[in-house]
Image (spheres, rainbow, N blue to C red):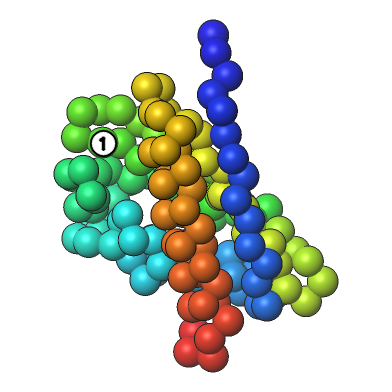
Amino acid sequence: MTIRESRTLQISVNREWRSAYDYASNPENVPKWASGLASGLQKSGNEWLADGPAGKLRIRFAPRNDYGVLDHWVITETGEEVYVPLRVVANDAGCEISFTLFRMPDMNEAKFAEDAAWVMRDLNALRAVLESEKL
């Protein structure tokens, strides 16, 4: 058994945590901020289907909960399942949103850094939506 290298990427958001969680936990809102899942998202039974950069994806989302857990599992066309831990945590009147990125097997350092930058772009897009008055 091995332990994968990981990075936890985090942003602070000027929005009450439950409001942020309510928005981010709705799969229909995901295409508005997650560029890797931004195309063709549609419900199919207990999963959601999307067109990702590397092909068709199936996504399962954690059930709604009182703890700010937004975990999801992305299954690629090849059947590889990628676990994505995502959390919203209260921080006074605002919140922190953290995303743990795992380095995939055979992923070089440059690709891992590129994925981390991509996640940060998406987290910043989520912050922009959450801090807008248009929710």
- Percent position (x, y) of residue 42? 23, 58
Quadrant the N terminus occupies:
top right
The amino acid type of the residue labelled 1 equals: Thr
What's the residue at 63%, 62% (across, down)?
11
Q: Nearer the viewer, residue 30 or 102?
A: 102
Q: Which residue has dot 1 on it?
A: 76
Residue positioned most to the front: 110
- Percent position (x, y) of residue 26? 44, 64
What's the residue at 66%, 77% (across, down)?
15
Q: Nearer the viewer, residue 5 or 37?
A: 5
| Label 1 CA crowd tier, 10 Å (few <14, some 14–19, many 20+) | some
Q: Quadrant of residue 55?
A: top left
Q: Quadrant of residue 30?
A: bottom left
Q: Quadrant of residue 110?
A: top left
In the image, is 135 to the left or to the right of 53?
right
Q: From this view, report whether residue 4 is shown above or below residue 24.
A: above
**Is residue 49 visible from the viewing direction of this image?**
no
Q: From this view, report whether residue 96 is shown above or below residue 76.
A: below
Residue positioned most to the right: 92
